[in-house]
Image: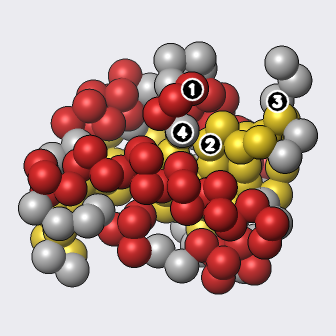
Amino acid sequence: MSLLIRPATLEDIAQIEAIVEAAYSPYIERIGRKPAPMLDDYASQVLARRVHVLAQEKTLSGFVVLIDTEEYLLLDNIAVNPAVMGQGFGRQLLDFAERHALDAGYPSIRLYTNEAMRENIALYLRRGYVETHRVEENGLRRVHMRKALS
């Protein structure tokens, strides 16, 4: 299976939204509401050239949303279709995000996740991210993390 990471197009929106729904719906009960990624405007994100997809031809396995700031690259969202989890696609997308940050000259990459998503926090810690702070934003309890790049 030949997968590549490429910039998303508007043709990808339906699949991106389906991945978001499948990946984040299980957290609704735990958080008590829809997680923030389920409320995002993916067409706007795609038009702003922030979204990259992991695709085999026209079939998407996952995606990542990256936002440039003056000081760091923000990994705003990363999601893999639960139907293909366990195949290393999340790792490929994280590797891509970190390479993208390095190539852009950023000294670090940052992200945040809901504190109820304990599995994600553990995964990021294993990947070398460190927790910087916790805060409530827009009614969501978020854990902010950072990874220094070299």
| For the residues bearing labels 4 and 1, Cβ distance under 8 angstroms | yes
Residue under the image location 54 percent in, 79 percent down: 41
**Whole-percent x and y of residue 113?**
31, 53
**Is residue 41 among what the camera can see?**
yes
In what quadrant of the picture does the C terminus appear? top right
Mark 3 is on which residue type?
A: Leu
From the viewer's perspective, is 11 left or right of 29? right
| For the residues bearing labels 3 and 4, Cβ distance under 8 angstroms | no
Residue under numbered circle 3: 3
Mark 1 is on which residue type?
A: Val
Measure the C-alpha gap from mark 2 to mark 3: 11 Å
The image's mark for residue 19 is none
Name the image quarter holding residue 28.
bottom left
From the viewer's perspective, is 77 left or right of 124? right
| For the residues bearing labels 2 and 1, Cβ distance under 8 angstroms | yes
From the viewer's perspective, is 124 left or right of 62? left
Callout 2: few (<14), some (14-19), or many (20+) C-alpha neighbours within 10 Å?
A: many
Compared to residue 40, the image places residue 85 above or below, namely above
Measure the C-alpha gap from mark 3 to mark 4: 13 Å
| For the residues bearing labels 4 and 2, Cβ distance under 8 angstroms | yes
Residue under numbered circle 2: 62
Measure the C-alpha gap from mark 4 to mark 2: 4 Å
| For the residues bearing labels 3 and 1, Cβ distance under 8 angstroms | no
**Whole-percent x and y of residue 13?**
68, 66
Residue under the image location 87 percent in, 23 percent down: 2
Of the image marks 4 and 2, the number of the one nearer the N terminus = 2
The image's mark for residue 84 is 1
Residue under numbered circle 4: 80
